[in-house]
Image (tube, rainbow, N blue to C red):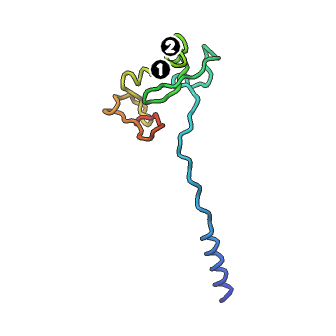
Amino acid sequence: NDNNSQTANQTKAVKSNKSKPQKEDTSLEFIWICTECREAECATHPDSDLLVCEGPCLRPFHFPCAGLPSQPKENEKWVCNDCMEGRHQCCVCHEFGMDMKDVHKCEKKDCGLFY
């Protein structure tokens, strides 16, 4: 009986000594894929860098995919058409809607998704 209680105590000790799970890094990792063409490399301009919308969506685009004739100047702020028009695609149902009416931006600071 003492052996059984000793084994039970050891089992309890093992269970109680489990390390706490590491706090998960909840920051979003940026995905370097163009929003429009869904490719990392632009088909028409393979050396084109991705530019990131400075509006609420924070999405990456190749300049040709964004409808721009050339890459904006480095110090020039660029905002995509969806942000300028105040409409975005829901990341769940994929329907477009007006911001703050049909779709709402995620409240997480660095997230550009709309629901």
Q: Return the x and y of residue 113 as percentages of the image width and height.
A: 45, 35
Residue 78: mark:
1
Quarter placement of the N terminus: bottom right
Q: Are marks 2 and 1 in contact (CB under 8 Å)?
A: yes
Quadrant in which residue 93 is drawn: top left
Residue drawn at point x = 56 percent, y = 53 percent:
23
Residue to which mark 2 is pinned: 68
Along the horizontal axis of the image, is 107 left or right of 62?
left
Mark 2 and mark 1: Cα distance apart in space: 10 Å
- For mark 1, give the secondary structure: loop
- Seen in the picture, residue 111 relative to 68 is either above or below; the reply is below
Comparing 4 with 48, the one in front is 48
Comparing 28 with 10, the one in front is 28
Residue 50: mark:
none
Instruction: In the displayed orientation, state which residue is furthest to the front.
Output: 75
Q: Earlier in the sequence, mark 2 or mark 1?
A: 2
- Seen in the picture, residue 38 relative to 14 is either above or below; the reply is above
Query: Callout 2, which amino acid?
Result: Leu
Quarter placement of the C terminus: top left
Q: Return the x and y of residue 80 as percentages of the image width and height.
A: 45, 21
Q: Residues within 10 Å of mark 2 (few under 14, many from 20)?
A: few
- Seen in the picture, residue 99 relative to 78 is either above or below; the reply is below
